[in-house]
Amino acid sequence: MAELKNQKILLVDDEQDILEFVSYNLTKEGYTVSTASNGKEAIQKAMETKPHLILLDVMMPEMDGIETCFNIREIDELNSTIIAFLTARNEDYSQIAGFEAGGDDYIAKPIKPKVLISRVKALLKRYRNHSEEPLDNESHLIQIGDLVIDKEKYIIVYKGQELILPRKEFELLALLASKKNKVFTRDEIYAAVWGDNIIVGDRTIDVHIRKVREKIGNELIKTIKGVGYKFVDIDE
């Protein structure tokens, strides 16, 4: 329980009963919980508290969850923050929009407290594993042709231009580029980027691959139909 005291969660929902119910269960588990009732307030609270995890409703007044997520992903200090949509909306287009905005996971409500706590623990475990990953002067840099990835600073330089990618897009690109020409299966990608304990939709990888290709072009990441993806060096 001691290590949970340092783990901060921001809960965002416009329904007060949900804020109280979820906040109570998370606080009971030892997490430090702050709340917001709309997107604008959520951005302000996120900048103030620097949470490890944000549980974000989609349908809210003033600024919906998708736009809120997109705006949070524009803030460099919150680049490592995990964002999970906690919402009753489970339509496919809503999930895709959430992932395109930079979300990491999608949790449908209503959800039983024990299940929610399990999902939260899995998400925060991914945060800890990433932040505690040992780095040295060689292992944190990946360079292939015009692409340089700095895993320590979360920076990508491509053809001399610095790119800032949302966390999952960054981790996906870093994974593929870590072993040039290796075909990563979809299961391998899910396990490495999202974790074995996190349930995401079938199109999650495809959405993130498309977003990465929009930034570095289509030619560096090849689709292996029925298997997965691989990174290639077009200069070879």
Image (cartoon, rainbow, N blue to C red):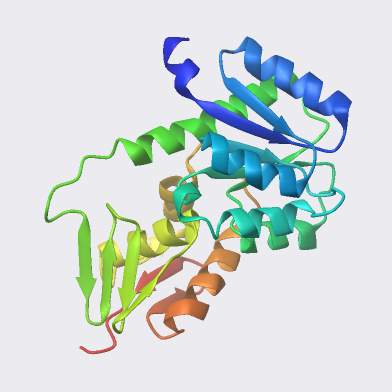
Height in image: 112 above or below 219?
above
Is 222 positioned to the left or the right of 100 in the image? Answer: left
- Looking at the image, which is closer to me, 165 or 96? 165
**Is residue 202 visible in this depiction of the protein?**
no
Q: Residue 134 occupies which quadrant of the picture? A: top left
Height in image: 189 above or below 160?
above
> Can you give x and y, in whole percent of width and height, for residue 17 in the image?
87, 24
Is 68 positioned to the left or the right of 1 in the image? Answer: right
Height in image: 130 above or below 155?
above
Is 78 positioned to the left or the right of 65 in the image? Answer: left
Is 156 positioned to the left or the right of 164 in the image? Answer: left
Identify which residue is drawn at 28% across, 73% down.
181
Identify which residue is drawn at 72% across, 43% down.
41
> Can you give x and y, in whole percent of width and height, for residue 125 in the image?
45, 31
Q: Quadrant of the C terminus?
A: bottom left
Q: Residue 119 occupies which quadrant of the picture? A: top right
Q: Give the number of callouts.
A: 0
> Can you give x and y, in whole percent of width and height, for residue 34 in the image?
65, 27
Identify which residue is drawn at 65% across, 19% down.
26
**Is residue 88 visible in this depiction of the protein?**
yes
Q: Residue 147 occupies which quadrant of the picture? A: bottom left
Identify which residue is drawn at 52% across, 31% down.
122
> Can you give x and y, in whole percent of width and height, for residue 140 in the image?
21, 54
Residue that lies at the very extreme toward the bottom in this rendered image:
235
